[in-house]
Image (cartoon, rainbow, N blue to C red):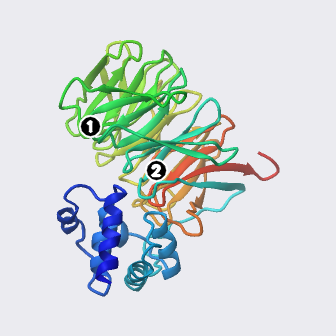
Amino acid sequence: MANGYKAVLIAVLMTGLVPSGASGQAQSRNAGLPDGDGKQLVEDVCTACHRTNLITRSSGYTREDWAELTSTMIDLDGDPAIRDEITAYLAQHFPPSGNRASKLVPGDVELTFKEWQVPTLGQRSRDPVEAVDGSIWWAGQSGNLIGRINPATGEMTEYPLPANAMPHSVTIGPDGNVWYTGNKNGSVGKLNPATGQIKVYLMPDPAARDPHTAVFDRTGILWFTLQQSNMVGRLDPASGHVKLATMKTPRSRPYGIKADADGALWVACNGSNCLVKVDPATMELTEVKLPIPATTVRRLDIDGDGIIWYVNSSQGRLGRYNPATGAIKEWPSPSGPRSHPYALVVVDGIVWYNESGKRPDALVRFDPKNEIFQSWAVPSGDIYAGIIRHMRPTKEGNLLIHQTSTNKIILVTPKEEGGR
């Protein structure tokens, strides 16, 4: 057992899943695990990549389902004894539970989920986006890579990034290049898909540490948020010039960002009850205060009428802001105030978002015309595990989502009763 245990840890180290100083980090990550055979293995192997609360706050699984879930994160087939000890421990202490169950709302729309398991395990794949040629790109944050899927063949290619980029998101430029936000090394990068060459743009201010989410405006300028740095940035691809602006409210933690039809940028505040409008010419920031002081907003989107839709993450609500009138309205999310809505996108007038605070992670559909909700559990293979952190539409009007915990990229195709 000791030799197998050592071999597993060596394998994890060699695949880049354990950061430098992992044994010390594990001590700070393993609070809350109950005593029992296998606890030490779970602490050392599982918390090399994520915190223990992803286990303790899960909905729990059978031994078979724990085995499937862990197989999407790390390959333990080389030492079945280690694998079996870990899954036995998890099944004993974290069996299936309904403590955080979603409230799923039935309706007339049917969904199909098509999944791709990305090649490198433990990378926490996220933020899929469709390119003009129909390929799907994603960011493998913990794996320090970005990847490409050919949906027609299922072929996947991964591109390693410069050291410590740790991409938080990926987006497609007007010229077809693939841009990523270097969340750990204070950079924005551009990958040329034809050559595989990467060009890196560093932040001009050392305080700008963590580029987060990016979007192109209609003129081809790249705008991005820097959550912990409390900034918004713009990058001109033609000159490479980067300009930064600091948020007016300290610790407002800018998160999601979208461009409206007039060219203005809108930013979600994950640390304060605000939406922020950014003037594209001057970078002047204008705050819109939301009614509930405890509100925090992960992401937002803009519909065809210029209406801002947002998730009130801390309060478990869906919100709507009309920039023309200043009117704000919110609806309680089906699973309640602790549902923590996270990602959001508007497609053909329909609002889609997820409830990340519940298990399983629920995908929610809201029709503004009749104010009706419908929701589904998001599958990850034969189990339900993970969180959608960003979602975007395809040109056909379908959804691209992901499950970071299980390293899956997912295409969601809606079909209404009697047709689309």
Residue at position x 31%, y 68% from top? Answer: 9
Q: As rendered, which of 350 and 384 lies closer to the eye? A: 384
Placement of 148 over or under 119, stated as above or below: above
Residue at position x 22%, y 40% from top? Answer: 251
Would you say 252 lies left or right of 341 here?
Answer: left
Q: As rendered, which of 301 and 38 lies closer to the eye? A: 38
Give the alpha-carbon distance from disc 2 to disc 1, as whole Å.
Answer: 18 Å
Under mark 2, the amino acid is: Ser
SS under mark 2: strand
Residue assigned mark 2: 125
Instruction: Say which mark, if any, is on residue 185.
Output: 1
Q: Badge 1: few (under 14), some or many (20 or more) residues near its Cα, within 10 Å?
A: many
Residue at position x 57%, y 46% from top? Answer: 156
Q: Are discs 2 and 1 less than 8 Å apart at CB?
A: no
Residue 109, quarter of picture = bottom right
Instruction: Say which mark, if any, is on residue 154.
Output: none
Residue at position x 19%, y 26% from top? Answer: 205
**Quarter holding the C terminus?**
top right
**Quarter holding the N terminus?**
bottom left
Placement of 121 over or under 160, stated as above or below: below
Whole-percent x, y for residue 331 in the image: 49, 50
Residue 110, quarter of picture = bottom right
SS under mark 1: loop
Residue 357 visible in the current orientation: yes
Residue 404, quarter of picture = bottom left
Would you say 413 lies left or right of 273 here?
Answer: right
Whole-percent x, y for residue 272 in the image: 28, 42
Does label 2 or label 1 sit earlier along the sequence?
A: 2
Under mark 1, the amino acid is: Asn
